[in-house]
Image (cartoon, rainbow, N blue to C red):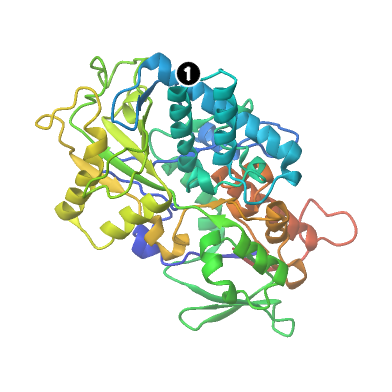
Amino acid sequence: MERTKLLADCPKRFNGTVRGRHWSELGAQVQLLIFDIPCFEADKASTGYNPIIELAKETGTPLHRWKESTLMFDSEGHLVGTAEANKALKRVWEILETASEYSKNYGDKADSSTSLYRFYQDWCNWAIQSGDIDQREAELVLGMSQMWGAYVGDRVERQSLKFFYLEDCIEGGKHINCDDCFIPTNYQKIVAKISAVPLAQATMLFDTTMVSVEARPDGPRPVCVTTSDGNMQYFDDVVVTTPLGWLKQHKESISQLEPRIASAIDSISFGRLEKVLIEFPSAFWESEPISLESDFNDAVSFVHWLSPIRTSQTVPRKWRLECVSFNAFHAPYRRSILLFYTFGECSTFITSSIRKLDGKVRDQWLQEFFEPYYSLLPGYTENTCAPLRFLATEWCNDEYAGNGSYSNFQVGMSDAARDVEAIRHGMPEQHIYFAGEHTAPFDGLGTVAGAYTSGEKIGKRIIESWQPSGPAIDGCVPEKRSTLC
């Protein structure tokens, strides 16, 4: 089988190497590829199989499992007591699980305009009336429900309750019995293993943008792909793996796109998740010092700042924030770094503000935005805790990332599951297929593991489509053909 891999604008963004769609470097001394691995099950049988975790194990890539050690600040900027914070967090996850079960069992009866946040509001109102919680706990629970935005890339008020079950894979340790992992080093070994066969056997086209994909039954091969340099190439099959956000903006590039697929692309939402890393001279937020060589099980893993009552010139909206601490990693991966997650309007504000900024000016802007948050942490002093450096993703500014992160399911959708199935089915009669996180099995949507599996499934479908009517000989395809991914 001949294969061609079309990588749009890769040399400019990744220095001509195969790196994946993630930033990989923070300064000269710390090289990190930040990559969350949400829980993923390969099929409805709940096997617990996660291809990315398996690749990490095969390549000796370390995996970190977070401990529930959390700091929480209320809307007044006061540190919430540990017992009170843990109680509120437990409530949040219990309600989330209840909402998931409701969506699975009664989602067909739910109004498409009802949000997950409305479910939280209704639950808190009921609990207050029944005396189960007081107003203070309700405020903390509703405030913490906003953390859902850091999973799907938009506000919890936008999350559809009707189709919430499609997000069930996220934060798997809370819902189902499987791993919730984080890679504390980089993705180099995994990328090397995944890319070994394509680099050795496929033709890689770097710095090349696809302009159109068109079925050409009268051509030398069934599908014609035109690139930005005017070149036209013909293939037996084409797999479109562009992000959903890119498809939304360029549906016309897929000639004769089936109307059901076009409406599905329009219908499925696209999130705006961004990440900002800040490195400090030390992990001043810990109650006691931790060396890079030692292990400390009580290190802070998560920090949550509820939506502040007051705004400022540098933070014009009441955005809640959260971060994870790299100081919670085991030695030797521990670093004095906080990784902030932003989403929705907050991500748009940050990325649009820093888009044309470089160097110290960019760092200064980021410091002024985040300082009102991290300066609340215990142990902070302005003289000794000034940040050393910053790294911020800008997927919202990236055309080839679709100006966003990954798919989610927002209020107003009427047939989300069928939308996913329509794109996943593709146009096999025209030899045009789609793959990516937005076409994954339902319990892998929005995840890299789901995207990986979607590619595997499409590959199998293409091979099967070319098999003769009789049994395959040694599993091989009897004729030479060309596939574009």
The amino acid on which the numbered mark 1 sits, given as a three-letter code, is Lys
Taking the image as drawn, is residue 28 in sight? no
**Disc 1 residue crowd, few under 14, some 14–19, many 20+, Cα 10 Å:** some
Taking the image as drawn, is residue 289 in sight? yes
Which residue is pictured at 24% across the width and 14% down the height? 288
Residue 171, given in percent of the width and then of the height, sits at 54, 33
Which residue is pictured at 28% across the width and 61% down the height? 355
Q: Is residue 121 left or right of residue 135?
A: right
Residue furthest out toward the left: 383
The front one of 406 and 457 is 406
Point out the image quarter for the C terminus.
bottom right
Residue 312, given in percent of the width and then of the height, sits at 23, 46
* Secondary structure of the residue carrying numbered label 1: helix
Q: Which residue is mark 1?
A: 87
Instruction: Kindly indicate the quadrant of the structure image that contains residue 150.
Output: top left
The front one of 371 and 475 is 371
The front one of 185 and 246 is 246
Residue 135, given in percent of the width and then of the height, sits at 46, 24
Q: Is residue 366 above or below residue 88?
A: below
- Number of marks in the image? 1
Which residue is pictured at 25% across the width and 41% down the height? 370
Point out the image quarter for the N terminus.
bottom right
Q: Is residue 378 left or right of residue 437?
A: left
Residue furthest out toward the right: 470
Q: Is residue 362 left or right of residue 138?
A: left
Residue 168, given in percent of the width and then of the height, sits at 63, 37
The front one of 406 and 86 is 86
Q: Is residue 447 above or below residue 217?
A: above
Q: Is residue 46 left or right of residue 230?
A: right
